Image (cartoon, rainbow, N blue to C red):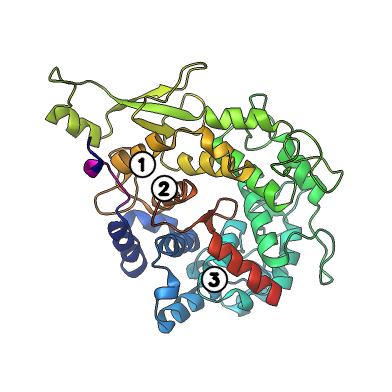
Protein backbone atom coordinates (compact mmCIF):
# COMPACT_ATOMS: atom_id res chain seq x y z
CA UNK A 1 0.00 0.00 0.00
CA UNK A 2 1.52 3.31 -1.03
CA UNK A 3 1.89 6.26 1.30
CA UNK A 4 -0.94 8.07 -0.47
CA UNK A 5 -3.27 5.09 0.01
CA UNK A 6 -2.67 4.65 3.73
CA UNK A 7 -5.88 5.08 5.74
CA UNK A 8 -6.06 8.20 7.83
CA UNK A 9 -8.36 10.06 10.19
CA UNK A 10 -10.99 11.77 8.06
CA UNK A 11 -11.43 14.84 10.26
CA UNK A 12 -14.04 16.67 8.09
CA UNK A 13 -16.26 13.57 8.02
CA UNK A 14 -15.95 13.08 11.76
CA UNK A 15 -16.93 16.69 12.40
CA UNK A 16 -19.98 16.24 10.17
CA UNK A 17 -20.90 13.06 12.06
CA UNK A 18 -20.73 14.75 15.46
CA UNK A 19 -22.62 17.84 14.31
CA UNK A 20 -25.41 15.58 13.05
CA UNK A 21 -25.48 13.95 16.47
CA UNK A 22 -25.72 17.38 18.12
CA UNK A 23 -28.18 19.14 15.84
CA UNK A 24 -30.49 16.45 14.45
CA UNK A 25 -32.60 13.61 15.81
CA UNK A 26 -30.62 10.51 16.72
CA UNK A 27 -31.58 7.09 15.27
CA UNK A 28 -34.51 5.36 16.95
CA UNK A 29 -32.14 2.91 18.66
CA UNK A 30 -31.12 5.73 21.00
CA UNK A 31 -34.61 6.04 22.50
CA UNK A 32 -33.68 3.27 24.95
CA UNK A 33 -30.90 5.48 26.31
CA UNK A 34 -33.08 8.47 27.22
CA UNK A 35 -31.94 8.22 30.84
CA UNK A 36 -28.34 8.54 29.62
CA UNK A 37 -28.71 11.59 27.40
CA UNK A 38 -26.26 13.50 29.58
CA UNK A 39 -23.60 10.94 28.70
CA UNK A 40 -24.33 11.34 25.01
CA UNK A 41 -24.10 15.12 25.38
CA UNK A 42 -20.63 14.89 26.91
CA UNK A 43 -19.37 12.54 24.19
CA UNK A 44 -20.64 14.87 21.47
CA UNK A 45 -19.25 18.08 22.97
CA UNK A 46 -15.91 16.55 23.85
CA UNK A 47 -15.48 14.94 20.42
CA UNK A 48 -16.05 18.26 18.70
CA UNK A 49 -13.56 19.82 21.08
CA UNK A 50 -10.91 17.21 20.23
CA UNK A 51 -11.49 17.85 16.53
CA UNK A 52 -11.10 21.62 16.92
CA UNK A 53 -14.80 22.33 16.33
CA UNK A 54 -15.94 22.51 19.96
CA UNK A 55 -18.39 24.78 21.77
CA UNK A 56 -15.90 27.65 21.66
CA UNK A 57 -16.81 27.84 17.96
CA UNK A 58 -20.59 27.92 18.70
CA UNK A 59 -22.66 31.09 18.91
CA UNK A 60 -23.41 32.54 22.33
CA UNK A 61 -27.05 31.52 21.91
CA UNK A 62 -26.05 27.89 21.24
CA UNK A 63 -23.81 27.70 24.29
CA UNK A 64 -26.50 29.30 26.46
CA UNK A 65 -29.09 26.82 25.22
CA UNK A 66 -26.85 23.82 25.92
CA UNK A 67 -25.94 25.15 29.35
CA UNK A 68 -29.59 25.65 30.24
CA UNK A 69 -30.46 22.11 29.13
CA UNK A 70 -27.75 20.64 31.37
CA UNK A 71 -28.62 22.78 34.40
CA UNK A 72 -32.27 21.70 34.16
CA UNK A 73 -31.00 18.25 35.17
CA UNK A 74 -29.38 19.47 38.42
CA UNK A 75 -31.06 17.77 41.38
CA UNK A 76 -32.10 19.97 44.33
CA UNK A 77 -30.43 17.52 46.76
CA UNK A 78 -27.11 17.46 44.87
CA UNK A 79 -25.84 15.83 41.70
CA UNK A 80 -27.46 15.60 38.26
CA UNK A 81 -30.07 13.42 36.61
CA UNK A 82 -29.38 11.78 33.27
CA UNK A 83 -32.07 13.64 31.31
CA UNK A 84 -34.59 16.46 31.80
CA UNK A 85 -37.26 13.75 31.49
CA UNK A 86 -35.91 12.25 34.72
CA UNK A 87 -36.01 15.39 36.77
CA UNK A 88 -39.32 16.45 38.32
CA UNK A 89 -40.19 20.08 39.18
CA UNK A 90 -38.78 21.18 42.56
CA UNK A 91 -42.19 20.99 44.26
CA UNK A 92 -42.25 17.19 43.92
CA UNK A 93 -39.01 16.69 45.82
CA UNK A 94 -40.40 17.63 49.22
CA UNK A 95 -43.28 15.19 49.58
CA UNK A 96 -41.74 11.81 50.44
CA UNK A 97 -38.63 11.73 52.69
CA UNK A 98 -37.40 14.89 51.05
CA UNK A 99 -38.16 13.42 47.65
CA UNK A 100 -34.53 12.50 47.04
CA UNK A 101 -35.35 9.00 45.84
CA UNK A 102 -37.87 10.20 43.26
CA UNK A 103 -35.88 9.95 40.01
CA UNK A 104 -32.70 10.60 41.97
CA UNK A 105 -29.44 12.06 40.76
CA UNK A 106 -26.85 9.48 39.77
CA UNK A 107 -23.06 9.45 39.67
CA UNK A 108 -22.44 8.81 35.94
CA UNK A 109 -24.83 11.58 34.92
CA UNK A 110 -23.15 13.96 37.39
CA UNK A 111 -19.71 13.22 35.97
CA UNK A 112 -20.90 13.81 32.39
CA UNK A 113 -22.88 16.92 33.37
CA UNK A 114 -19.89 18.60 35.00
CA UNK A 115 -17.66 17.85 32.04
CA UNK A 116 -20.31 19.01 29.57
CA UNK A 117 -20.83 22.22 31.57
CA UNK A 118 -17.11 22.91 31.43
CA UNK A 119 -17.43 23.35 27.65
CA UNK A 120 -20.21 25.95 27.90
CA UNK A 121 -19.03 28.06 30.86
CA UNK A 122 -21.46 26.48 33.29
CA UNK A 123 -19.44 25.04 36.18
CA UNK A 124 -19.98 28.15 38.31
CA UNK A 125 -23.72 27.36 38.40
CA UNK A 126 -23.19 23.97 40.07
CA UNK A 127 -24.21 23.71 43.72
CA UNK A 128 -20.85 22.38 44.87
CA UNK A 129 -21.69 22.08 48.56
CA UNK A 130 -24.83 19.99 48.00
CA UNK A 131 -23.06 17.83 45.45
CA UNK A 132 -20.08 17.09 47.72
CA UNK A 133 -22.37 16.22 50.64
CA UNK A 134 -24.36 13.94 48.33
CA UNK A 135 -21.17 12.13 47.28
CA UNK A 136 -20.42 11.13 50.86
CA UNK A 137 -23.85 9.52 51.18
CA UNK A 138 -23.04 7.14 48.31
CA UNK A 139 -20.08 5.44 50.01
CA UNK A 140 -20.50 2.01 51.60
CA UNK A 141 -18.59 0.64 54.58
CA UNK A 142 -16.31 -1.43 52.34
CA UNK A 143 -15.17 1.76 50.60
CA UNK A 144 -17.12 1.17 47.37
CA UNK A 145 -19.68 3.59 45.96
CA UNK A 146 -23.20 3.15 44.71
CA UNK A 147 -24.89 5.04 41.91
CA UNK A 148 -27.74 6.85 43.67
CA UNK A 149 -29.69 7.24 46.93
CA UNK A 150 -32.97 5.31 46.99
CA UNK A 151 -36.28 6.67 48.26
CA UNK A 152 -35.76 5.01 51.67
CA UNK A 153 -32.29 6.54 51.98
CA UNK A 154 -30.28 3.46 51.04
CA UNK A 155 -27.44 3.26 48.51
CA UNK A 156 -28.59 1.92 45.15
CA UNK A 157 -26.68 0.57 42.19
CA UNK A 158 -23.66 -1.69 41.86
CA UNK A 159 -20.33 -1.51 43.64
CA UNK A 160 -17.93 -1.84 40.72
CA UNK A 161 -14.99 0.28 39.62
CA UNK A 162 -17.02 2.47 37.29
CA UNK A 163 -18.70 4.26 40.18
CA UNK A 164 -15.36 4.66 41.94
CA UNK A 165 -14.03 6.36 38.81
CA UNK A 166 -16.86 8.82 38.28
CA UNK A 167 -16.84 9.56 42.02
CA UNK A 168 -13.16 10.45 42.09
CA UNK A 169 -13.45 12.63 38.98
CA UNK A 170 -16.47 14.52 40.35
CA UNK A 171 -14.68 14.96 43.66
CA UNK A 172 -11.58 16.27 41.85
CA UNK A 173 -13.57 18.69 39.68
CA UNK A 174 -15.36 20.16 42.70
CA UNK A 175 -12.71 20.18 45.43
CA UNK A 176 -9.33 19.20 43.98
CA UNK A 177 -6.89 16.64 45.37
CA UNK A 178 -6.83 17.81 48.99
CA UNK A 179 -7.98 15.20 51.50
CA UNK A 180 -9.93 15.99 54.66
CA UNK A 181 -12.50 18.68 55.38
CA UNK A 182 -12.59 21.51 52.85
CA UNK A 183 -14.88 24.52 53.21
CA UNK A 184 -16.59 22.88 56.17
CA UNK A 185 -17.57 19.81 54.11
CA UNK A 186 -16.22 16.42 55.18
CA UNK A 187 -14.42 14.30 52.64
CA UNK A 188 -15.20 10.75 51.60
CA UNK A 189 -13.29 7.92 53.30
CA UNK A 190 -10.32 7.91 50.94
CA UNK A 191 -8.47 5.06 52.68
CA UNK A 192 -11.50 2.78 52.44
CA UNK A 193 -11.90 3.62 48.76
CA UNK A 194 -8.23 2.87 48.06
CA UNK A 195 -8.62 -0.44 49.88
CA UNK A 196 -11.59 -1.34 47.68
CA UNK A 197 -9.62 -0.47 44.53
CA UNK A 198 -6.61 -2.52 45.64
CA UNK A 199 -8.79 -5.52 46.43
CA UNK A 200 -9.93 -5.64 42.81
CA UNK A 201 -6.48 -6.53 41.45
CA UNK A 202 -6.40 -10.15 40.31
CA UNK A 203 -3.69 -12.80 40.20
CA UNK A 204 -2.83 -11.96 36.57
CA UNK A 205 -2.35 -8.23 37.16
CA UNK A 206 -5.61 -6.89 35.77
CA UNK A 207 -8.36 -5.33 37.86
CA UNK A 208 -11.86 -6.69 38.18
CA UNK A 209 -15.32 -5.33 38.86
CA UNK A 210 -14.67 -5.90 42.56
CA UNK A 211 -12.85 -8.45 44.70
CA UNK A 212 -12.79 -12.06 43.40
CA UNK A 213 -14.06 -11.29 39.89
CA UNK A 214 -12.42 -11.61 36.46
CA UNK A 215 -10.04 -8.89 35.31
CA UNK A 216 -11.45 -6.52 32.69
CA UNK A 217 -9.81 -3.70 30.74
CA UNK A 218 -12.61 -1.21 31.42
CA UNK A 219 -12.52 -1.82 35.18
CA UNK A 220 -8.72 -1.72 35.10
CA UNK A 221 -8.82 1.74 33.54
CA UNK A 222 -11.42 2.96 36.05
CA UNK A 223 -9.34 1.80 39.02
CA UNK A 224 -6.08 3.24 37.67
CA UNK A 225 -7.67 6.60 36.79
CA UNK A 226 -9.35 6.72 40.22
CA UNK A 227 -6.02 6.17 41.95
CA UNK A 228 -4.42 8.92 39.86
CA UNK A 229 -7.02 11.43 41.07
CA UNK A 230 -6.42 10.25 44.64
CA UNK A 231 -2.66 10.75 44.17
CA UNK A 232 -2.01 7.08 44.93
CA UNK A 233 0.09 6.14 41.92
CA UNK A 234 3.89 6.39 42.16
CA UNK A 235 5.70 9.01 40.14
CA UNK A 236 7.31 7.58 37.04
CA UNK A 237 10.70 8.24 38.63
CA UNK A 238 9.84 6.33 41.82
CA UNK A 239 9.74 2.60 42.49
CA UNK A 240 6.87 0.73 40.92
CA UNK A 241 6.23 -1.21 44.10
CA UNK A 242 7.28 1.19 46.85
CA UNK A 243 5.39 3.95 48.70
CA UNK A 244 3.93 6.85 46.80
CA UNK A 245 6.51 9.60 46.42
CA UNK A 246 5.94 12.34 49.00
CA UNK A 247 4.28 10.32 51.78
CA UNK A 248 4.32 6.90 53.43
CA UNK A 249 0.96 5.67 52.16
CA UNK A 250 1.02 2.57 50.01
CA UNK A 251 0.36 2.93 46.28
CA UNK A 252 -3.05 1.95 45.08
CA UNK A 253 -1.96 -1.04 42.99
CA UNK A 254 -0.38 -4.08 44.57
CA UNK A 255 1.66 -5.05 41.49
CA UNK A 256 2.07 -2.44 38.75
CA UNK A 257 4.46 -4.49 36.54
CA UNK A 258 1.88 -7.29 36.44
CA UNK A 259 -0.81 -4.77 35.49
CA UNK A 260 1.31 -3.42 32.65
CA UNK A 261 1.96 -6.96 31.38
CA UNK A 262 -1.75 -7.78 31.49
CA UNK A 263 -2.66 -4.60 29.63
CA UNK A 264 -0.08 -5.14 26.89
CA UNK A 265 -1.36 -8.72 26.50
CA UNK A 266 -4.77 -7.40 25.45
CA UNK A 267 -3.38 -6.85 21.93
CA UNK A 268 -4.88 -9.15 19.31
CA UNK A 269 -3.75 -9.57 15.72
CA UNK A 270 -6.48 -9.36 13.07
CA UNK A 271 -6.13 -11.26 9.79
CA UNK A 272 -8.32 -11.92 6.78
CA UNK A 273 -9.88 -15.38 6.65
CA UNK A 274 -8.37 -16.23 3.27
CA UNK A 275 -6.42 -14.72 0.41
CA UNK A 276 -6.60 -15.24 -3.32
CA UNK A 277 -3.87 -17.02 -5.23
CA UNK A 278 -2.97 -13.90 -7.20
CA UNK A 279 0.02 -12.37 -5.50
CA UNK A 280 -1.59 -12.38 -2.07
CA UNK A 281 -4.07 -9.66 -3.00
CA UNK A 282 -7.57 -9.94 -1.59
CA UNK A 283 -10.29 -10.89 -4.05
CA UNK A 284 -13.41 -8.73 -4.33
CA UNK A 285 -15.31 -11.30 -2.28
CA UNK A 286 -12.66 -11.20 0.42
CA UNK A 287 -12.70 -7.42 0.41
CA UNK A 288 -16.46 -7.49 0.99
CA UNK A 289 -15.93 -9.99 3.79
CA UNK A 290 -13.33 -7.71 5.32
CA UNK A 291 -15.75 -4.78 5.35
CA UNK A 292 -18.39 -7.03 6.93
CA UNK A 293 -16.03 -8.00 9.72
CA UNK A 294 -15.18 -11.53 8.56
CA UNK A 295 -11.83 -11.70 10.31
CA UNK A 296 -10.31 -14.08 12.78
CA UNK A 297 -8.66 -13.03 16.02
CA UNK A 298 -5.08 -14.08 16.66
CA UNK A 299 -4.52 -13.57 20.39
CA UNK A 300 -1.09 -12.70 21.70
CA UNK A 301 0.86 -15.85 22.58
CA UNK A 302 3.73 -15.48 25.10
CA UNK A 303 6.95 -15.17 23.15
CA UNK A 304 5.19 -14.47 19.84
CA UNK A 305 5.75 -11.02 18.39
CA UNK A 306 2.93 -9.06 16.76
CA UNK A 307 5.30 -6.67 15.05
CA UNK A 308 4.44 -7.99 11.59
CA UNK A 309 0.67 -7.84 12.04
CA UNK A 310 -1.02 -5.27 9.79
CA UNK A 311 -4.07 -4.89 12.03
CA UNK A 312 -4.04 -5.08 15.83
CA UNK A 313 -7.00 -4.46 18.10
CA UNK A 314 -7.62 -4.90 21.82
CA UNK A 315 -9.94 -7.15 23.75
CA UNK A 316 -11.28 -6.47 27.22
CA UNK A 317 -10.75 -9.92 28.68
CA UNK A 318 -8.81 -13.05 27.84
CA UNK A 319 -10.09 -14.99 24.81
CA UNK A 320 -12.60 -12.31 23.78
CA UNK A 321 -13.01 -10.53 20.46
CA UNK A 322 -11.48 -7.13 19.80
CA UNK A 323 -13.55 -3.98 20.19
CA UNK A 324 -12.81 -0.36 19.28
CA UNK A 325 -13.42 0.95 22.79
CA UNK A 326 -10.64 -1.16 24.33
CA UNK A 327 -8.06 0.75 22.34
CA UNK A 328 -8.89 3.53 24.80
CA UNK A 329 -9.42 1.52 27.98
CA UNK A 330 -6.02 -0.17 27.50
CA UNK A 331 -4.14 2.74 25.93
CA UNK A 332 -5.49 5.18 28.50
CA UNK A 333 -4.51 2.91 31.39
CA UNK A 334 -0.94 2.61 30.14
CA UNK A 335 -0.73 6.37 29.52
CA UNK A 336 -1.83 7.15 33.09
CA UNK A 337 0.76 4.75 34.52
CA UNK A 338 3.45 6.49 32.48
CA UNK A 339 3.80 7.75 28.93
CA UNK A 340 6.71 5.37 28.34
CA UNK A 341 4.45 2.37 28.91
CA UNK A 342 2.18 3.48 26.08
CA UNK A 343 5.12 2.75 23.77
CA UNK A 344 4.82 -0.96 24.58
CA UNK A 345 1.89 -1.34 22.20
CA UNK A 346 2.06 -1.57 18.42
CA UNK A 347 0.75 1.87 17.52
CA UNK A 348 1.06 1.67 13.71
CA UNK A 349 -0.98 -1.54 13.51
CA UNK A 350 -3.52 -0.25 16.03
CA UNK A 351 -3.99 2.90 13.93
CA UNK A 352 -4.43 0.72 10.84
CA UNK A 353 -7.10 -1.31 12.65
CA UNK A 354 -9.02 1.80 13.65
CA UNK A 355 -8.68 3.64 10.34
CA UNK A 356 -9.16 0.77 7.90
CA UNK A 357 -11.58 -1.48 9.78
CA UNK A 358 -13.77 0.47 12.24
CA UNK A 359 -13.69 4.08 10.96
CA UNK A 360 -16.91 4.60 9.01
CA UNK A 361 -17.29 6.36 5.68
CA UNK A 362 -19.91 8.75 7.16
CA UNK A 363 -17.68 9.54 10.13
CA UNK A 364 -17.44 7.98 13.56
CA UNK A 365 -16.25 4.52 14.54
CA UNK A 366 -18.07 1.22 14.90
CA UNK A 367 -17.72 -1.36 17.65
CA UNK A 368 -16.36 -4.08 15.33
CA UNK A 369 -15.19 -4.12 11.70
CA UNK A 370 -18.30 -3.68 9.56
CA UNK A 371 -20.41 -2.23 12.41
CA UNK A 372 -22.19 1.13 11.97
CA UNK A 373 -20.82 4.05 13.98
CA UNK A 374 -22.25 4.81 17.40
CA UNK A 375 -21.63 7.67 19.81
CA UNK A 376 -19.86 5.59 22.48
CA UNK A 377 -17.35 3.83 20.23
CA UNK A 378 -16.88 6.91 18.06
CA UNK A 379 -15.76 8.96 21.04
CA UNK A 380 -13.45 6.32 22.48
CA UNK A 381 -11.96 5.70 19.04
CA UNK A 382 -11.01 9.38 18.84
CA UNK A 383 -9.75 9.28 22.43
CA UNK A 384 -7.48 6.32 21.67
CA UNK A 385 -6.03 8.12 18.66
CA UNK A 386 -5.55 11.31 20.67
CA UNK A 387 -3.54 9.36 23.25
CA UNK A 388 -1.33 8.19 20.37
CA UNK A 389 -0.91 11.87 19.41
CA UNK A 390 -2.80 11.64 16.13
CA UNK A 391 -2.27 14.82 14.05
CA UNK A 392 -5.36 17.04 14.00
CA UNK A 393 -6.53 16.04 17.48
CA UNK A 394 -5.91 18.06 20.63
CA UNK A 395 -3.57 16.64 23.31
CA UNK A 396 -5.59 14.28 25.50
CA UNK A 397 -5.86 13.80 29.26
CA UNK A 398 -6.32 10.05 29.72
CA UNK A 399 -7.50 10.19 33.33
CA UNK A 400 -10.26 12.77 32.88
CA UNK A 401 -11.12 11.46 29.39
CA UNK A 402 -11.11 14.84 27.66
CA UNK A 403 -8.58 17.22 26.14
CA UNK A 404 -5.75 18.52 28.31
CA UNK A 405 -6.92 22.01 27.47
CA UNK A 406 -10.28 21.23 29.03
CA UNK A 407 -8.69 19.83 32.18
CA UNK A 408 -6.78 23.10 32.54
CA UNK A 409 -10.03 25.06 32.12
CA UNK A 410 -11.73 23.00 34.85
CA UNK A 411 -8.80 23.56 37.20
CA UNK A 412 -8.90 27.29 36.56
CA UNK A 413 -12.66 27.58 37.18
CA UNK A 414 -12.40 25.51 40.38
CA UNK A 415 -9.61 27.74 41.67
CA UNK A 416 -11.48 30.95 40.88
CA UNK A 417 -14.64 29.74 42.61
Q: Where, by quadrant of the figure, is residue 131 drawn?
A: bottom right
Give SS at disc 2: helix
Q: Which mark is residue 30?
A: none
Question: Nearer the observer, disc 2 or disc 3?
Answer: 2
* Residue for badge 1: 354
Give SS at disc 3: helix
Q: CA distance from mark 3 to mark 1?
A: 30 Å
Indicate whether 236 appears above or below 214.
Answer: below
Residue 144 versus residue 174: which sits nearer the camera? Answer: 174
Name the residue furthest front.
3
* Residue for badge 3: 117
* Lower sequence index among marks 1 and 2: 1
**Residue 7 falls within the magenta-colored stretch:** yes
Q: CA distance from mark 1 to mark 2?
A: 7 Å
Residue 311 is situated, as x and y percent measured from the top left of the image, at 35, 32
The answer to whether residue 123 is seen in the rendering is yes
Q: Is residue 366 left or right of residue 256?
A: left
**Residue 362 falls within the magenta-colored stretch:** no
Q: The magenta stretch spans which residues?
A: 4-9
Q: Is residue 187 left or right of residue 385?
A: right
* Lower sequence index among marks 2 and 3: 3
Q: Which quadrant is home to the N terminus?
A: top left
Q: Which mark is residue 381?
A: 2
Q: Rate crowding at label 3 as few (under 14), some (14 to 19) or many (20 or more) other CA atoms within 10 Å.
A: many
Residue 197 is situated, as x and y percent measured from the top left of the image, at 71, 41
Q: Residue at x 61, y 59 (%)?
A: 106
Q: Where, by quadrant of the figure, is residue 352 drawn?
A: top left
Q: Residue at x 56, y 50 (%)?
A: 398
Residue 141 is situated, as x and y percent measured from the top left of the image, at 80, 47
Amino acid sequence: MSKEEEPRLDIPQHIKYWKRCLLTLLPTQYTSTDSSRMTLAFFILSSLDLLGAGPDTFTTAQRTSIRGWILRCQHPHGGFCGSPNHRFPDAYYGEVDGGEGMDPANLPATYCALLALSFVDGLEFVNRAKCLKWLRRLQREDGSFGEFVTQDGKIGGGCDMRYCYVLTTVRWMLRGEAEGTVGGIEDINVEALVGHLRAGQTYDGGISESSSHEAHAGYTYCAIASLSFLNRLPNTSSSLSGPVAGHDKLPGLTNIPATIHWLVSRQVGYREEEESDEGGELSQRDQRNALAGVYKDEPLVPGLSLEDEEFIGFNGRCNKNVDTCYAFWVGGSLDILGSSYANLINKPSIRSFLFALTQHRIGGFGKHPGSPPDIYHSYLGLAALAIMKEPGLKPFDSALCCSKEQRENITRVRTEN
